[in-house]
Amino acid sequence: MRKTFLLSLIVFAAAHCGAAPPQRIASLNLCTDQLLLMLVPRERIVSVTDWAAKPESSYMAAAARGIPGNGGLVEGVLPAHPDLILAGPFSDATMIQLLRKLGYRVEVLDIPRSLDQARDYILRFGELVGAAAAARALVADMDARLARIPPPSAAPPLAAVYAPNGITVGSGTVLAEIVARAGWRNLGSERDVQGYGELSLEHLLIAQPQLIVLDVTAADAGGSLAHGYLAHPALAALHAQTVVMPPPLSECVGPMTVDAIELLAARR
Amino acid sequence: MSRHAIGDRRLLGTLGVLLVLAFALSLQLGPVALDWAAALAQPRDSVHGIILWLVRLPRELLAICVGASMGLAGAALQGLLRNPLAGPDLLGVTSCAALGAVLSLYFGLAALNGLLLPVGGMLGAGVAVGLVFLLAGRSASVLALILAGMAISAIMSSLIALALNFAPNPFAMSEMMYWLLGSLTNRSNHDLLVALPFMVAGWLLILSCGRFLDALTLGEDSARSLGFRSAPLRWRLVAGVALCVGASVSVSGNIGFVGLVVPHLLRPWVGFEPRRLLLPSALGGALLLLVADMAVQLLSPGAGIKLGVVTALVGGPFFLHLIYRNRAVLT
């Protein structure tokens, strides 16, 4: 009886604190984790995904250290009684339904796919978590850094993105945008690849890119045939520059995207 | 010179010429049109040279070596077990080799030393041939041996799936098909170099047992009475098969049916003598796999179709035909 009362009190409290900025925020998505860590003081974050503290996947690994990981699970989220739960488009729909049924406020946020979308997204996100000023400052900082990237030359050099299994990227991917904004032509875009697509090793070689951007997702997780594509001796024989794109810079769109652009622009 | 020797030379010559032709043709095939002049004039400094020497040549040479290994191993096993339905894949040898290679690749051993990849494959193959051999040693029937091979295959395939499930690399599970069906996509001179020494050793071991295989056709006791020390020669054959099949599978996956089909197709040409069958089977296996790989490249220029799909489409119906023809022995 008493338990039920306590629970309903919590539910009531959770439902009625919409106006004040949320003080106990939980995140169920690596991208919302990272933006949350950038905008909100850590006292107001109760849990993030376990990926957020791992340097091989997260841009904000240092900031996330010490914040409880929720494993993306209901059991991981509930104990801290969050007053706002942030989820991504790929979060488990039944879990979100369950959390809402229990009276929690869950916001499902679409993930931006380009820098233009990221600007609006960050501002909206800032309002949602009660950090509008910080969000405006973050966007202004991104724009200032983007403005410092030297503009593309009249005849931009060619770059090719190469990922495990011989995959490259074309229009609609943030990696293609990173390559283009850094002042390179993107082989995938020129070959009319939509999203992610296969690029045979021979086609990559014959195009003779000056830069090969290796997308090394999970390269340190033991061997695989997929990663064998990136180690083919013919790639080394091409004598192109190679640069490894760290996954934390390319998995979400935001300030890390600007880091990635700076990384590739420096190779021109 | 005997009539046999002339016939054998003609057969080997024909297979050799076909192999060279297929090899030349296979180098011409690929996603991009090759500028041969540039490729030959500047093997290291032109992109065409890189494509020819570092992409196409290793792949086609690997097709030849893997095909030769499978053909030779098939002929050796059919002779050793005096069983027309034997083949490295049907006896579970290739699946077991694939398991060994999988454990070595995905759990970090191959990263320590590239040679540990074929070593894993050969250990797996050795375990399976040993098992089959022990079963056969107790004079198992043709049928019992094939069923045992099927059981070994099924167990090994499950263990491969299990190992890939537990592998730390997120791409591991999607590579299941490669290990079950085999492919030469994206193979490099590195793969060729780690596997070739073991394959050659296996070929030599098998080829050195030719006369013993001939004697075995008369039966175990007759072979012994002809002066062959049966046990060491049997183990030499087992080791030879384990070496060349294990090394092959570790760099190309489990490519089926080549070892079964090729010796059968060539047997009538060599008077049903196992020794005379060995070398033609090696050449025939190489030719078959090279042609199969060309078919793969023509049908799907990308990574698409697995090589084992083509060999199984050719070999599967052939196997059914063999079962039908041997139904008297099998029942």
Image (tube, helix red, strand yellow):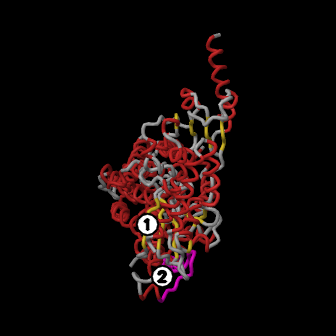
Q: Residues within 10 Å of mark 1 (few under 14, many from 20)?
A: some
Q: Which mark is residue A243?
A: 1
Image x and y of residue A166, in percent: 53, 64
Residue A202 position (above or below residue B144): below
The type of residue carrying mark 2 is His
Q: Position of residue B291 (x, y in %)?
A: 56, 71
Please state the horizontal and vertical placement of residue B285, each as a whole percent of the image. Answer: 49, 66
Q: SS class of the residue under badge 2?
A: helix
**In the drawing, does residue A158 fall left or right of residue B320?**
left
What separation in Å lies between label 1 and label 2 (alpha carbons)?
24 Å
Chain of the residue displaying label 2:
B
The chain identifier of the residue carrying mark 1 reads A
Q: Quadrant of the N terminus of chain B?
A: bottom left
At horizontal 48% and vertical 34% (from top left) the residue drawn is: A68
The crowd level at tag 2 (other Cα within 10 Å; few <14, some 14-19, many 20+) is many
Q: Secondary structure at mark 1?
A: strand
Q: Are marks 1 and 2 on the same chain?
A: no
Q: Are marks 1 and 2 in contact (CB under 8 Å)?
A: no
Residue drawn 65% across the image and 20% down it: A9
Q: Amino acid at mark 1?
A: Val
Question: Could you tell me what secondary structure mostly forms the magenta stretch?
Answer: helix
The segment highlighted magenta reads B16-37
Whether residue B285 is visible = yes
Between B3 and B301, the one nearer to me in the picture: B301
Please identify the residue farthest to the top as the structure is shown. Answer: A1
In this orientation, does residue A202 appear?
no
Q: Position of residue A108 (x, y in %)?
A: 66, 42
Residue B36 is inside the magenta segment: yes
Q: Nearer the viewer, mark 1 or mark 2?
A: 1
Residue beneath disc 2: B48
Q: Depth check: A254 or B276 in front? A: A254
The stretch drawn in magenta includes residue A268: no
